[in-house]
Image (cartoon, grey):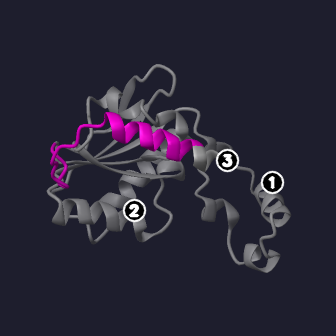
Amino acid sequence: MIIDKILKANEDFIKAFEPKKMSHLPQKKLCIVTCMDTRLTGFLEPALGIERGDAKIIKNAGNTVVDQDVIRSVAASILTLGVEEVMVIGHTNCGMANVNPEKLKTAMEERGIDPKEIAKVNLKEWIGAIDDEESNVFQTVEQIKNSPFIPEDAPIHGLIIDIESGALKVLVDGS
């Protein structure tokens, strides 16, 4: 099982790790809302020039605001943790742009999810499916900016990272 490999890797990590005291406050005063895509792991941070301790990073499927959890986390970062700028960073070739609600429904039913529960939600909205990556970044930036819990003076930027080259494209300069 993968848990055994993870625990072994953790043992090896601890043997080689040199602990140091770090603040829980983001050193670059930055909060990033981005996708949970596995291809961003170990890729996004170096592409942005950030390291451990530099930024608060909020990840979810498609870097979307489906409920208030993302807003709550961004607000907490700004209001209590010293964040001064927020970046919404989408990426090319996002899997959430290809979600088929019927296939999702079938997969849910095959895994034993109660069809009555499935029928209670709009699956496309519930899963956070997006129409395209760039319009999703614009929409997410607007949702964050327009929240009554986000200070008006907080810059909210919107970017896309090319998942193959690492090149960043600014869609919204929140300055």
The disc, 3 or 2, on the residue closer to the chain's N-terminal end is 3
Magenta-colored span: 5-27
Instruction: Categorize mark 3 by other alpha carbons within 10 Å: few (<14), some (14-19), many (20+).
Output: few
Q: Is residue 170 left or right of residue 34?
A: left
Q: Which amino acid type is shown beneath numbered disc 2?
A: Val
Q: Which residue: 51% across, 47% down?
A: 7
Instruction: Categorize mark 1 by other alpha carbons within 10 Å: few (<14), some (14-19), many (20+).
Output: few
Circle 1 residue = 103
Q: Nearer the viewer, mark 3 or mark 1?
A: 3
Circle 3 residue = 1
x, y (%) of residue 167? 40, 22
Q: How many marks?
A: 3
**Is the Cβ of the residue at disc 1 closer than 8 Å to that at disc 2?**
no
x, y (%) of residue 150? 25, 65
Q: Which residue: 47% across, 35% down?
A: 40
Q: CA distance from mark 1 to mark 2?
A: 26 Å
Residue 144 sits above or below residue 117 on the image: above
